[in-house]
Image (cartoon, rainbow, N blue to C red):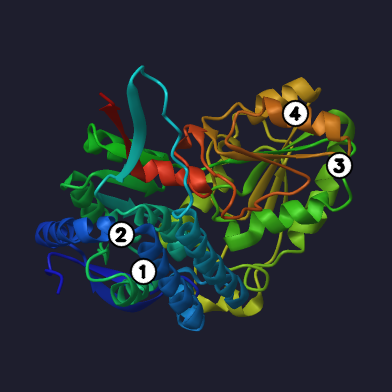
Amino acid sequence: MLSKENVTCLTDPRTGSERGRLDNGGERDVAVAVAASRTAQPAWGSLVTRERSARLLRLAALMSEYAAQYAEAERAGTGKPLADAVAEVQQCADVLSFYAGATRADLAPAAGGRLPGRESWVRWEPLGVVAAVVPWNYPLLMAMWRCAPALAVGNTVVLKPAETTPDSALLLADHARECLGADVLRVLPGDRRTGRLLVASQVDMVAFTGSQRAGLDIAARAGLRRVSLELGGNCAAIVLPDAPVHTYDALADACTYNAGQSCAAPARVITLRENHQEVVEGLAKAMVGRRAGVHFGPLNSPAQAARYDRLVTATEAGIRYAGQIGARAEESGGYWRPSLLLADLPADAPAVTEEVFGPVLTVQQADGVEEAVQLANGVPQALAASVWGDSVGRALSVAARLNCGEVWVNCHLEQTAELPHGGRGGSGHGTDLSVLALGEYQRPKTVTVHLG
């Protein structure tokens, strides 16, 4: 049992009502979790990859078998629509299955013949105990992005879910104990203090997804230990004059999915002057057609609703096109906010320079492609972006000049386990997804033998 140093009141964001209470992990709880993970790591790490893969596949199968329970656990703390929650659970099982297979591939570089009379090779070894601190917007999926590659290469993991959304992680802990063994994946619920205690504990690496402010704090506390950070997006979408007809609906869908609470969601639309009015009108129609409580869920907490309100209120200039909130949602008392398009904004508007993290699109106009690229690259975050245009050559040229880790052309927010995801600059560093993420959680050891 967790020590009762303090308690978190869990809230249903759909209603604003308390739905339970959970003890936050304190110093003793952190120490016990890390020590247990440390004890479990040698046996887990020494398994041959075939056996470790088989256990991970059993966990993925169990997640699929209990998909309905995982989906309800996700909805309890996020208010996601049922179809979205079910789809995300399926993605989680797929990510875990992918890494169960990827760890059996030979990814080590060849090292023979580098020195005369010697033979060399590289051993890739797990780091040890990984602390994974994940956010509330995709509680289970972000946990899987971090835990799956770390576990696949032989680390044990202490998972700290977000304060408001521990439900699916606790279910995962039960299934992981059954499939992987005791203490291979520990879950430590708690608040920010719990997270800080975990980062300061004797873990070998910290993998964090969240705000830039928290990421900087974690980097300072981690010292010389390895840190992987994904710190948000405020992503640009450059809409060229020859953008395809599906552009407006696709951007509205991507912006309002998960109520806009996605690091890689489109946030800043940039047009050229020649197509600006057409884009504003097309996006206004598409955004207004997405209704909170019908097409997407609520914001996660009073703090997130207040952030939305502050940035929207502070952005006084421009033209506003607002969607509606479904009648039942509006009467529920939850943290519902409408879809919103803010057009003709200056570059220093608060909704442009800061990440709203809600169902909000801003629209700016540029004099040409070069200025559009400058505006896209003009914020500290550099996670992802998209380019919309039927001229493949021009669209790819623009994509090459965007300073970010992921670019889509004529689509947005489309991801799969096989493709890497990661940011630059204010969006952090490190790689999620793909075989490249396996390297985040391993260290190389060169072995050289004198052949005599």
Between label 1 and label 3, give the one nearer the viewer.
1
Q: Position of residue 380 (x, y in %)?
A: 51, 30
Tell which circle, 1 or 2, labels the residue nearer the N-terminal end. Answer: 2
Q: Residues within 10 Å of mark 3 (few under 14, many from 20)?
A: some
- Residue name at image x 26 percent, y 64 percent: 184
Q: Residues within 10 Å of mark 2 (few under 14, many from 20)?
A: many
Nearest the viewer among 205 and 243 is 205
Q: Quadrant of residue 181?
A: bottom left
- Give the CA distance from mark 2 to mark 3: 42 Å
- Give the CA distance from mark 1 to mark 3: 41 Å
Labelled pair 1, 2 in contact (Cβ < 8 Å): yes
Residue 169, which numbered label? 1
Tell me the residue that label 2 is attached to: 159
Q: Dot 3 lies on which element?
A: loop
- Give the CA distance from mark 1 to mark 2: 8 Å
| Vertical comparison of 443 with 412: above or below | above
Q: Dot 1 lies on which element?
A: helix
- Give the CA distance from mark 3 to mark 4: 13 Å
Q: Amino acid at mark 1?
A: Ala
Q: Amino acid at mark 3?
A: Ala
| Vertical comparison of 140 with 345: above or below | below
Q: Residues within 10 Å of mark 4 (few under 14, many from 20)?
A: many
Q: Amino acid at mark 4?
A: Val
